[in-house]
Each structure stands twice: as C-alpha cells, then as structure tokens.
C-alpha cells in the first residue's frame, strides 16, 4: 500500500512562474480555495529570466499605438497561423494587466512625464515594451509573488507533479512528490490549471533551465488533451556562444532595441542582405535611418536587426554556414559602436543593459561597452502547446486548463519578443478565472486508488534497478539528438531518424536506474523527467514531419517554400489514439472574423 | 584536459562529511558546472539547487572555499585549483541534504511584513505618475534575486541564531523598497524597531560585500531605515510631543 498525504483544493495550479501565479491570484480572488505547486522555490521560475519587457499597447511613448496595431503585429509575426481570438483578447487586455502590476507595486522605468516607459522590440511597430532595465521578468515575478503570498494561496514548493488524475473523463487532481523527503502528495481538485512553461531542456543548446522539461504538455497529452503546432520551437537568435559552459544563455533582444548591430567576420551588417516581403514596408535599408528608429525617431523605419526572431536566427545560421561566422561559430552583436553616436555611451549601455553588462563581464571577460559579443541561436520558447479554448483557456479535457507558455495559439508560427510576458498575464488571469468558475459549478471528483498505486509503482521503478543506466546520460543523448535532427534546420530523413532514436531512448529510459534514497535525489528526478521529455520530443518531431513547408520558426531544408501547394492554413494536432499511440493530423484554422480581417488590412 | 578536485559536503541534518571528487575542467567553467559534471558522472544523488545558471534566480547559493557565492557566477579561473576546492551549503540555515538548505524561514518572514498599499491613483484612468529619479533608489533594492547570501553571512543569524528576533538584511532591503516606494502609504517603522530587530544590525557591511547584485544594502537600505526609526521613536522633541499629545 503506497504512502501519501492528501490535499484538497477547489483549484490546483501547477507551475508558479508568471502564468501560474497570476492564475492562482485570480482564482483565489474569486473566492475558491487554491493550491499552487512549483518544482523550485517560489520566485525562481523561468519568468525570472525574461529580460526585455512586457508588450502592451499602452501608447505612452507613441500615441499611434493601440490594440489594433498590437493585434496586427502579433498576427503578422505568427505568419497568420495564430488563434486570432487569443491574439485579439491579448492585444485588448494586456494594457490593463500591466497597469494592474503597478497597482500591486511594480516599478517600471518611467517616461519624462512619469508614466510607464516603453521600448522598441522586434516585430512591434511602435515602442511597446514596458520594462525595468533588462530585468523585467524579475520585477514581474517578484510583484506577483509578493502580492500572491497575501491572497490565501497554499504554496507547495519543490513539489513535482508526475501525473494527472482523472475520473469519468474529467480531471480530478494530480499526483506529485515533494523533493525534500521524496514523499508522495495527492492533490484532489475540482479544476486544474497547467502553467508549466516550455520544453527547451529537450535540446542541447537552450536558454531554458532544468525545469523546462515539457511537464504540462506531457501531463495534458497523457490525460487526453490535444497538442497543437508543436513543430514551432523558437530559436532565439542571440544566445551566448563562448565559453562552452555558458553556451545558450540568453542575450536580450533589448541590445538590438537599444541600437546594437549584427555583423559577420567580414564586418558586414548582413541583416540588410535579405528583408522578407511581409516586412519590406516597415524595414529600413539605410543604417542611418535604422539608428534613428532605435533612438525614438517616429518617422524612421526599423533596422533589419529588429526583424522577427525566426528570420534573424536563420540569417545568423546562413552566415555561419557560409563561412562568415565569428571565431566560436556565431556572429558579432555590437552595442559598443554607439559611442560614435552618443557621448556617454558607456554609461548609457550600463544603465540600459545592466544584466548584459554584468553577464558578459563575469562569464566571458567581455566588456560590452568596448567590444562586440559573440552570439548564435539558442532554443528559447515553444509556440506550440496544449490546445485551449481562447476565452476560458480550458483544454479538451473538462476541468483541465492551461495558461502561459504551455498553452498554445496566441503566437502562431513565431512569437514576438515581449508577447510572452503579456501572454502569461492575460491568459494566466483567464485560466484562473475560468478554473474557479468551473470549480464552483462542479463537485469534487473521485480520486481512484488503483490509479494512484499504478503511478506510484512506476515512479519508484528506477530504485528497483540500481544497476540500470544513468538517467543523466539518457537525457544528454536525447538533447544531442534533438539538437541535431529536430533543431533549427529539419528534413524528412532527419525527422524519421529522430522518431527511431526517440523509440530507442524510450526503451533506455524504461531501464534507467538510480542509487541513493528518495530524499532530494536529482538522479531520481531526472529519471522521472525523462518520460515528459520523451513525450514532447516525439510530439515535436511528429508535428515537424507533418508540416512540409518552411514557415515561421519551422524550417525544412527539403521544403523551403512557405506553404504547401493547396494545403491552406492549418494547425498540426497531436493526440493519443485509442491504442495509446501518438498520432498527428491537420485541422484547418477557422476563418478570421471579418472585423479582424479589416484591422489587418488597415494596418498594412 | 586539466583536472581539479572538489571537496563537497555530503550529508543530511544528522550527519555528513566532505567527499573529494576529481573531475575534468575546461575553459570558462563555473563551480556549478563542475558540481553538475560530478553529479552526472559520479554522484547522481548529489543534491544541489539551481535554475537559471545566469545569476538571475538566486538558487545556487553556497560557500565556495568559505566564501558565500552563487555557484553559477563563480568562475574556476578565479579560484586556485592546485588545492581542493571546498563547496559546502550555507551555514545560516538548517541543512536538508548536501548543498541544499531549508530556507523556508525566509518565506515566513516576508509574509509578516506589511504588504504594499498604494495611495489613490493620480489619473482618472487609474494610473500613477512617478519620476524616474524618485524610483531609482527603490529599483536598486528590487534587483534583489533572493539568493539569501546576505542572510547567510550576517553574524546575527549565522553566529547568534536570532532568527526569531531579527529579519536579516534581505528583509531590510525588502522593507526599504516598500517604505521608499513613492506610492506606498504604510508605516512599518514600529515593526522594524520592535519585532524585526533592526537594532541588532551593527553595520559591519558583510551583507553588502557578498551581494551578487551589488546592492548597497547597509548604506542605502539599513542605515536610512535605522535613521527613520530613530527619528520616529528616539527624537527627544518628538518624544515630548508624543507624551503630551498621545496618538488618537
């Protein structure tokens, strides 16, 4: 008989980054009891690493901005594969969500007249990102945390959910374990919100922390929910490339927003070489005009360094492949050059980009006020994820909700920088609100003892197999394989190979073994993570195989065209079939509402 | 490839000892890289907290050769590798296992500090106006990543164990950020004096020295708070004033 402790809540939120905290605050304010489970300590989740800012059409810096422009920018950035209703709600509600943070104590940088300052970012037509230097995510998570701890939310830190529990087609709770003693916890809940973030740890080079193992995606999939557009994994163009131990750590897009330029080994600003058709009207072909744009000239067009992330990443890969890369396989990102333009450049850079200054100085012995950085693409974000209803954020499984990065739809084929912090506020709130409503309308579900026994015995299996394979080695091999075969350049052959490799890794993971006991055991934790990582890796590879075109963040060497002839616009949908196998299909994207179509046309 | 020896604390609340691990080291490595390499190759159950590995989350605090540090921001080329590098958990908190300590006390302390309470909005649309120069000093405090190295090094907690009488540098910074927030209307001075124990701090500035975010904890947060406390409770004229006109 398995030992566990039980906790009962109306709403259980899994994940305590921005989306989870915002959901918990909202659900609690609706008057229901809320439990919040997080893998790390409170306030350490990945939101803390977001740098550049939160996108919201506050129109504080440029009054021409508004929800319509933000909506059109988001749709264009996503190559019109976005869930347009989510893009509409997001553009309309983001300003209120940001102002709300100020009411809870956030201190964003200010304009001259004392309002929230906004900065330029890739793909946003006007300065739109509310920010705090380059540590916006820290400010946001701290405000949500410090507000949230006074809202009566019950927090379970360093607790990992292994499986969702279901009864009669509905989610009724979750099975987790706490790290300190390794004991099991059963959460009974009328509604569950997944806010577990992304999947970056499935790749070798990533800006993501150990937590980003696709737990929410995998939990939802195994509970019967659908995953959409999993092929769209964002490779952020600027990660650190040297020294090897810091490879992948993010270099904020804010560097380019402040005037930073990308050059190759020949000293050329290669981003001018190719400007995509969708952006030709908005992008400057003149370096001088580009500089004026970054300095707030309202009539100037953006420099090509501020094109969308998918495009910039591809251009960097092209430069490296064609032999014009930097010494360590990246390109150069230079902000120090602005000393030609402004007198107090050094101080300006340190004030606007303090974390970047610090990061390069400490980890790479590079003074960014004096010399260029070396950068290259790093796995950063997954646009795809759990399919949700746009308004309520409920998945196809009753009682199961998803918000933030693990929910999908808003970003289409590519996410604009800054739209993730706004996403987690807008849809974190909505998920919390509708989960609370669901909890009020539905009774307590029945947790099934046999299901608990089964999950527990599976979870403890690595201890019975102390001579089994080292789970860290399996994880490394998965990361290497995904980087090579499912990374920034993909092909039919590579993806088929990836499918086979994943099946081999599943067999190996089944034989993983760990030593020691259940108390705070990272080996055991890694063994448990493997199931989630393998599930989402398979989903990404399968969806990538299905989309035989190169669009947004998904690049196929064998299908360079943006659209498959006659295929129309569709989502890839991954689900578990009746035999327990993963299958993928295509579903057409619903036709855009007429008034929204008008908005897009109006914005050119 | 070069190798180095890491002398890592292994054990739990009941017992423990240093164990030497030899591992390969390469250019640019930080202490956390070495600990991870040892964990992956030699000691799968070696407990260590970490998240961002970029100095932004404050999870991987430990004592490296006796110095309180973020392991992710401590380069191996900053420390001598010809002798074993000792890596041990923070001393000011109870040990859970290996390099992981029980920091839950900090979360309890924070809850007791009166939360932010803003003045009514300045504009009809529910927003406020604040000048950048008025928030600069609070933004410095808000850089805090809650690594608790300042708590670890503070002798009031580390040596005197006054966790029930003293909230520590981290929470003086937190209280200062609230007290100096241009919109906040609460007064936390009475608690700072009576229950938070600000008087125990004798401004040795150990906290400031170890802060990975370079927050000038003592000069900019603690001393101004001490001054405010003195001003409110020990100013002789104000004291007379209070005697003759007690608070309503």
Image (spheres, rainbow, N blue to C red):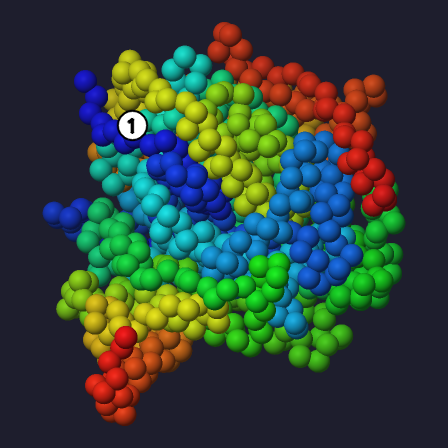
Vertical placement of residue B177 versus A69, above or below: below
- Nearest the camera: B77 or A350? A350
Residue occupied by mark 1: A186
Q: Residue furthest bottom?
A: B237
- Residue found 37% across the figure and 60% down from its top: B115
Q: How many marks?
A: 1
> SS at mark 1?
strand
User: Crowding at label 1, few (<14), some or many (≥20) Cα neighbours within 10 Å?
Assistant: many
Picture coordinates of residue A105 (x, y %)? 47, 61
Picture coordinates of residue A602 (x, y %)? 85, 43
Vertical placement of residue A251 versus A512, above or below: below
- Residue found 61% across the figure and 76% down from its top: A347
Q: Which quadrant of the view contains residue B5?
A: bottom left
Picture coordinates of residue B96 (x, y %)? 22, 47
- Residue found 79% across the figure and 20% down from its top: A567
Screen quadrant of the C terminus of chain B: bottom left
Q: Residue furthest top?
A: A579
- Nearest the camera: A62 or A370? A62
Q: Which quadrant of the view contains residue A165?
A: top left
Chain for disc number 1: A
Vertical placement of residue A111 versus B2, above or below: below
- Residue found 57% across the figure and 43% down from its top: A426
Residue B138 located left or right of residue A541: left
- Nearest the camera: A90 or A365? A90
Picture coordinates of residue B247 (x, y %)? 27, 77
Q: Is residue B96 visible?
A: yes
Q: Which quadrant of the view contains residue A522?
A: top left
Q: Is residue A245 visible?
A: no
């Amino acid at each position: 008989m398995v030992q566990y402790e039980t906790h009962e809540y109306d709403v259980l939120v899994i994940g305590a980054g921005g989306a989870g905290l915002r959901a918990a605050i909202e659900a609690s304010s609706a008057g229901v009891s809320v439990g919040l489970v997080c893998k790390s300590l409170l306030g350490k989740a990945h939101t803390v690493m977001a740098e550049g800012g939160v996108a919201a059409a506050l129109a504080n810096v440029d009054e021409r901005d508004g929800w319509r422009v933000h909506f059109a920018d988001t749709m264009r950035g996503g190559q019109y594969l976005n869930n347009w209703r989510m893009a509409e709600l997001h553009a309309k509600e983001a300003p209120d969500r940001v102002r709300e943070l100020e009411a809870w104590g956030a201190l964003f940088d200010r304009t001259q007249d004392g309002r929230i300052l906004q900065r330029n970012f890739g793909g946003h037509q006007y300065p739109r990102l509310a920010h705090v230097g380059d540590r916006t995510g820290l400010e946001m998570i701290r405000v949500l945390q410090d507000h949230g701890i006074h809202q009566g939310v019950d927090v379970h830190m360093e607790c990992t959910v292994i499986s969702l529990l279901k009864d009669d087609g509905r989610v009724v709770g979750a099975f987790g374990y706490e790290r300190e003693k390794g004991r099991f916890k059963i959460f009974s809940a009328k509604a569950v919100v997944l806010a577990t973030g992304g999947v970056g740890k499935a790749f070798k080079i990533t800006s993501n922390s150990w937590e980003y193992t696709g737990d929410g995606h995998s939990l939802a999939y195994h509970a019967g929910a659908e995953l959409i557009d999993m092929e769209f994994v964002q490779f952020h163009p600027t990660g650190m490339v040297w020294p090897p131990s810091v490879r992948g750590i993010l270099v904020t897009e804010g560097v380019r927003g402040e005037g930073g330029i990308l050059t190759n080994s020949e000293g050329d600003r290669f981003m001018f070489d190719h400007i995509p058709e969708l952006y030709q009207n908005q992008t400057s072909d003149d370096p001088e005009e580009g500089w004026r744009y970054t300095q707030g000239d309202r009539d100037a067009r953006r420099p090509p360094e501020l094109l969308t992330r998918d495009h910039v990443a591809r251009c960097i890969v092209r430069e490296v492949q064609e032999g014009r890369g930097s010494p360590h396989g990246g390109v150069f990102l230079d902000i120090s050059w602005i000393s030609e333009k402004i007198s107090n450049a050094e101080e300006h850079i340190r004030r606007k980009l303090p974390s970047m200054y610090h990061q390069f100085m400490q980890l790479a012995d590079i003074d960014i006020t004096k010399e260029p950085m070396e950068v290259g693409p790093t796995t950063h974000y997954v646009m795809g994820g759990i399919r949700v209803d746009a308004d309520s954020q409920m998945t196809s499984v009753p009682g199961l909700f998803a918000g933030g990065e693990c929910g999908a739809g808003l970003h289409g084929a590519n996410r604009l920088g800054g739209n993730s912090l706004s996403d987690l506020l807008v849809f974190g709130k909505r998920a919390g609100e509708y989960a609370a409503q669901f909890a009020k309308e539905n009774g307590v579900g029945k947790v099934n003892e046999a299901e608990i026994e089964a999950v527990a015995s599976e979870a403890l299996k690595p201890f019975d197999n102390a001579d089994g394979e080292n789970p860290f080695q399996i994880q490394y091999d998965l990361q290497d394989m995904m980087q090579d075969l499912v990374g920034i350049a993909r092909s039919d052959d590579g993806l088929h190979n990836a499918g086979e490799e994943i099946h081999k890794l599943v067999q190996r993971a089944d034989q993983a073994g760990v030593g020691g006991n259940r108390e705070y055991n990272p080996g055991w934790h890694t063994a448990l993570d493997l199931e989630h990582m393998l599930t989402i890796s398979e989903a990404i590879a399968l969806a990538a195989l299905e989309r035989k075109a190169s669009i947004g963040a998904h690049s196929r060497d064998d299908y360079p065209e943006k659209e498959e002839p006659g295929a129309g616009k569709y989502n890839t949908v991954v689900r578990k079939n009746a035999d327990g196998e993963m299958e993928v299909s295509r579903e057409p994207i619903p036709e855009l509402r007429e008034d929204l179509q008008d908005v897009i046309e109006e914005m050119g | 490839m070069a190798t180095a020896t890491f002398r890592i604390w292994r054990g739990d609340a009941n017992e423990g000892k240093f164990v030497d691990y030899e591992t390969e080291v390469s250019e640019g490595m930080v202490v956390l890289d070495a600990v991870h390499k040892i964990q992956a190759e030699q000691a799968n159950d070696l407990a260590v907290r970490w998240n961002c590995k970029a100095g932004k989350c404050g999870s991987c605090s430990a004592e490296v050769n006796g110095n309180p540090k973020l392991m992710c921001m401590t380069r191996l080329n900053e420390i001598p590798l010809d002798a074993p590098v000792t890596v041990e958990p923070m001393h000011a908190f109870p040990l859970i296992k290996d390099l992981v300590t029980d920091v839950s006390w900090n979360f309890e302390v924070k809850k007791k500090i009166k939360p932010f309470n803003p003045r009514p909005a300045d504009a009809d649309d529910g927003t406020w106006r604040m000048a950048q120069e008025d928030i600069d000093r609070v933004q410095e405090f808000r850089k805090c990543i809650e690594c608790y190295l300042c708590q670890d090094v503070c002798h009031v907690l580390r040596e005197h164990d006054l966790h029930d009488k003293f909230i520590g540098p981290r929470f003086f910074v937190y209280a200062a950020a609230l007290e100096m927030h241009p919109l906040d209307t609460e007064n936390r001075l009475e608690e700072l004096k009576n229950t938070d124990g600000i008087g125990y701090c004798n401004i040795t500035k150990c906290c400031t020295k170890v802060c990975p975010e370079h927050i000038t904890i003592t000069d900019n947060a603690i001393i101004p708070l001490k001054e405010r406390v003195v001003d409110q409770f020990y100013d002789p004229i104000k004291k007379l004033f209070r005697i003759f006109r007690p608070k309503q």
